[in-house]
Image (spheres, grey):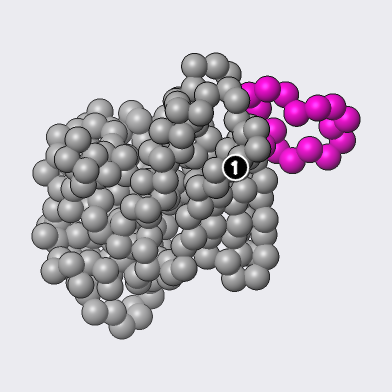
Amino acid sequence: MRIIIGGALGRMGREVARAALEAGMDVACGVDIAYQGQPMDFPMVAAYADCKAAADVLVDFSRADGLPALLEYITTTGLPSVLCTTGYTDAEVAAIHAAAARVAILRSANMSLGINVLQRLVAMAARALGTGYDVEIVEKHHRMKLDSPSGTAGMLYEALQSAREYDSPMVYGRKGRAEKRAIGEVGIHAVRGGTVTGEHEVGFYGNAEEIILTHRAESRALFAEGAVRAAAFLAGKPAGLYTMQDVVTQVLGK
């Protein structure tokens, strides 16, 4: 299998290249706006418009503001694409959905297979435990992370909300709230500091018991490995919008 890597000069782009080679894939080309002739182990271009390489799938770990050029390229070529970038606006998400009518796109706020398994576990717990348990989501990241709360915290909240048969409003912290915790609300809290790669905790707090589901990312390599696994899943798929949950379904066989 041959892949193209968007954001190939970045830390995650380099991790994807390593993971792809370890999985027996060939990197057909790397694309990065910062490319100025730096030596690489595979062909490089600075813009998608300059990419003429034949490939089976594209993996993008670049920036949200590069989306228009990316979508133009993949809808023109019909190249299935794994979008790993976060921070898209509502308008950009809508553009991705529109493009998915013409080409296979897999998009996830977190490419870790473990996080996506956690998402399923959260939904299972929410259905089983019902209204008798309060739920809090706590996410931790390094001091340089820009968005807050994380996109992954949003994924976990969506899993919880979809599994419940009642509304679960989000509450970001509780400063200034001089009132009891409302039934059904979900607290979401962000911690930023040091070099934490990523930690997400979903706590179910009931009467005299607690259930805590936690995922800790110890290396960014796991996100690259998940992206490569997603690329293998997506290659050859018909047009449509896919997620890492589709990859989990394939792994589980159901």
Residue 198 at x, y percent in the picture = 53, 60
Is residue 96 at least partly visible in the picture? Answer: yes
Q: Residue at x 15, y 34 (%)?
A: 238
Is 172 magenta? The answer is: yes
Q: Is residue 248 left or right of residue 25?
A: right
In the displayed structure, 236 sits above or below 42; it is: above
Residue under circle 1? 210
Q: Residue furthest top?
A: 166
Residue positioned 11% across, 44% down in the render: 236
* Most common SS among magenta residues: loop
Res. 76 visible in picture: no
Residue 139, given in percent of the width and then of the height, sits at 59, 51
Closer-to-camera residue (86/98): 86
Residue 32 occupies quadrant: bottom left
Question: Where does the magenta region start and end?
Answer: 171-187
Q: Is residue 104 magenta?
A: no
Task: State the residue at coordinates (14%, 53%).
Answer: 56
Across and down, in percent, residue 10 comes to 42, 68
Q: Mark 1 is on which residue type? A: Glu
Q: Residue at x 24, y 39 (%)?
A: 249
